Amino acid sequence: MIDDATRAEIRRLVLGEGFAVGTVARRLGVHHSVISRAVRESDRARRVRAPSVLEPYKAYIVERLEKYPHLTATRLLLELRERGYRHGIAVVKRFIAAVRGSRSKKAYLRIETTPGEQAQVDWGSFGFMRVGSATRPLSCFAMVLSWSRALYLDFSLDQKIETFCAMHRRAFEFFGGVPQKILYDNLKTVVLHHVGATVQFNPTFLGFAGRYLFEPTAAPPYYPQAKGRVEGSIRYIRHSFFYGHSFASLDEVRAAAARWRDEIANARMHAATRERPAERLIMERPRMRALPGHAPPVDLVVPAIVSKEASVRLDTNSYSVPPSYVGRSVLVRADEQSVRVVEGGAEIARHARCWDRRRVIEDPAHREALIARRTGAQGPRRRDSFASLAPECRAYLQEVARRRIQLDNEVGKLARLVERYGQSDVVEGTRRALINRTFGAHYVRACIDQARFARGLGEPPEPVVTGHHAADSLVVEPHDLETYDALFETPENSRAETPASPEADAAEPGGVAAADGPDEFEDG
């Protein structure tokens, strides 16, 4: 584009003075097509652009955006409709983008802290993880020391306050001390309400902070820049460690994260400090508060009443207790590895924690005690126990139930096989029985013995009994394999090997019969 003065000069030189188009283009430093276009233009006044349909409302939009910067175009369109605007949203969006783009960018002041003064904490969401038949959210806990930039991270399957406190305890033990202050986002586990400068912290978390003697502080709402160190660490974890990898279990991702933390994250040359966080942590550790003599408990504690099935529920799973406690009030204490049931200060049951959903976790002693009380429940309990070993076992019982086999008797035999051989061998034997479509505990045992003998374990298996009368009554006598050599002998070989004497013929009349046999048949 050229201005009006240049356009007028072009028309004067070409039309008035008679200069060539190329000469004027070189003189003014423009392309020759610009000269030609300017010459062809008429002397009429340039068209005046029509005013925008949004012109009467621009001042209102600017005023609203200055007061409420996060208003959306859809919300502003509704407000403009009330004021008489009858056009589309596209022109509104373009004007909003122009207004926001014309604003000056915010300037931020880097805040430097002293050693041991502050740490920053946040959760990061890292998708989901399959645990059994359940899908649980995978979360990453990150704590960064503001001065040394030393990083601690850990993964969990929930963000409950008990897990949050347990992560803090591990981070303090990793750093070897406690910072004076810890900065948080407005997490519900830390902040219940945040109105202006008034912050109401979670009383449970305040009690935990009081045991470690650190001061929790809350960042302003919608202001992630206040805790930029931990925000940047979450992004660093996501792109440097997690992205592009797959993990089969929580233990696997936690072990990999610990190696990455020690070998890469804390050993790298940090871009801001130009030092290694692990080396700065050595200098910062003496300035931090000492760890308490006794770590405070961080277990999940849930009151419960023992059900009629002699179990308590936690996170949709059922955990067994001795049947003598049915109907009594107990406390369920759980951490990441175990679940304990406590009554009156005494532990009455302990189980490994299950992170699957809707599972029944039983102690065999509790089950036997319950069966002793209710003998009629022995059969169904055994069936459920065997069916829970593997999908093949459940399918096997379904096939047995369709046949003329006494189910409880069959389950009892299978249970004894489990006690004798173990679960894995019985599951494999059941799978083979399903493939061969032959059912019965005796056949399952034969399959197990064959498999164990093939692996060099145990004695040779007993003959397989199928249950079919004709097949089971068939007797096969062993045959001497040396008699097969006679099939390859010829009369010439026999005469060559055996002396032709009367004594030999008399001693072995069968040899004469074998030699003369064909002639007798010809004469007959």
Image: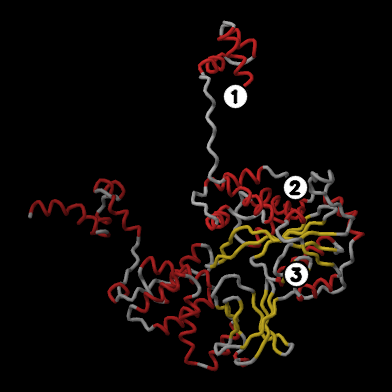
In terms of sequence position, does the residue under pointer 3 or pointer 2 come before the other?
2
Q: Position of residue 4 (x, y in %)?
A: 61, 22
- In the depicted structure, whether residue 453 falls above or below residue 265: below
Which residue in the structure is indicated by mark 1? 1
User: What is the number of callouts on the image?
Assistant: 3
Q: Position of residue 232 (x, y in %)?
A: 73, 51
In the rendered image, the quadrant that contains the C terminus is bottom left
Q: Position of residue 401 (x, y in %)?
A: 36, 79
In terms of sequence position, does the residue under pointer 1 or pointer 2 come before the other?
1
Q: Nearer the viewer, residue 406 or 420?
A: 406
Which circle, 1 or 3, is nearer the viewer?
1
The amino acid pointed to by label 3 is: Cys
The residues tagged by marks 3 and 2 sit, at their Cα atoms, a distance apart of 35 Å
- Looking at the image, residue 474 sits to the left or right of residue 79; the answer is left
* Secondary-structure class at tag 3: helix
Which circle, 1 or 2, is nearer the viewer?
1
Which residue in the structure is indicated by mark 2? 106
The amino acid pointed to by label 2 is: Lys
Q: Nearer the viewer, residue 162 or 479?
A: 162
- Looking at the image, residue 444 sits to the left or right of residue 521; the answer is right
Q: Residues within 10 Å of mark 3 (few under 14, many from 20)?
A: many
Q: Quadrant of residue 138?
A: bottom right
- Looking at the image, residue 27 sits to the left or right of residue 511; the answer is right
Residues at badges 1 and 2 in contact (C-beta under 8 Å)?
Answer: no
Which residue in the structure is indicated by mark 3? 165
Q: Nearer the viewer, residue 348 or 342?
A: 342
Color theme of the render: secondary structure
Q: Residues within 10 Å of mark 1 (few under 14, many from 20)?
A: few
Residues at badges 1 and 3 in contact (C-beta under 8 Å)?
Answer: no
Residues at badges 3 and 2 in contact (C-beta under 8 Å)?
Answer: no
Label of residue 481 in the image: none
- Looking at the image, residue 159 sits to the left or right of residue 499; the answer is right
